[in-house]
Amino acid sequence: MSSFRQAALGMCLVAAAAVSAGAQQASSRDGITPRERREVRRDKREVRLDRRDIGEDRRDIREDRREVRQDVRAGDRAEARRDRRDLRGDVRDVRRDRRDLRQDQREARRDWREAKS
């Protein structure tokens, strides 16, 4: 390998190291470590999934209420009773998911504050 190629390769290597070091300094300037970023992202993902679960449960509740109304109109008491039981379970799921959502939101805020300090 010629000395010119070796010099050019060496300069590229030094430039790449400088860019990498600059990127690390830029990310450490805001005081947030990669581990803290992952933790905050995980908390945000949990919040998003809880919101999705609540939406799915609300759709189930609307469907169950519609089924109960249809069963009552048709005079099918046994089926209405089963649908009401299913409806109560879906309402419990929404309450549980809301509680999880609040907890995950608090955790995300706490992790973000800890990462910023």
Image (tube, grey):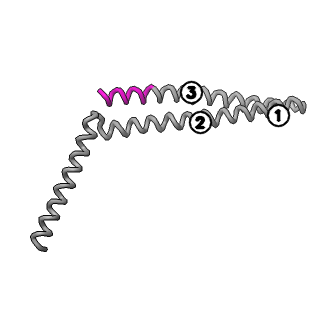
Q: Which element type, helix, strand or loop, lies under badge 2?
A: helix
Residue 91 magenta-drawn?
no
Q: Say the numbered circle drawn on residue 98.
A: 3
Tell me if 40 is positioned left or right of 82 in this view.
left
Q: Residues within 10 Å of mark 2 (few under 14, many from 20)?
A: some
Task: Name the kind of residue labelled 3 in the image.
Answer: Arg
Whichever of labels 3 and 1 marks the residue nearer the N terminus, that label is 1
At 25% from the left edge and 38% from the top edge, which residue is drawn? 28
Residue at position x 23%, y 50% in the image: 19
For marks 3 and 2, the one nearer the N-term is 2
Specify whether 103 is left or right of 78.
Answer: left
C-alpha gap between disc 3 and disc 1: 29 Å
Towards the viewer: 114 or 89: 114
Q: Amino acid at mark 2?
A: Asp
Q: Nearer the viewer, mark 2 or mark 1?
A: 2
Quarter of the image where the C terminus is located: top left
Inter-mark Cα distance, 2 to 1: 26 Å
Q: Residue at x 44, y 35 (%)?
A: 43
Looking at the rendering, the stretch of residues picked out in magenta corresponds to 106-117
Q: Which is more foreground, mark 3 or mark 1? A: 3
Across and down, in percent, residue 97 comes to 57, 30
Q: Which residue carries the number 1 mark?
A: 79
Which tag, 2 or 1, sits closer to the chain's start? 2
Question: Do the residues under discs 3 and 1 have CB atoms within 8 angstroms?
Answer: no
Is 104 rendered above or below residue 13? Answer: above
Query: What type is the residue that disc 1 sits on?
Result: Glu
Numbered-mark total: 3
Tell me, for residue 53, which label it has, or none.
Answer: 2
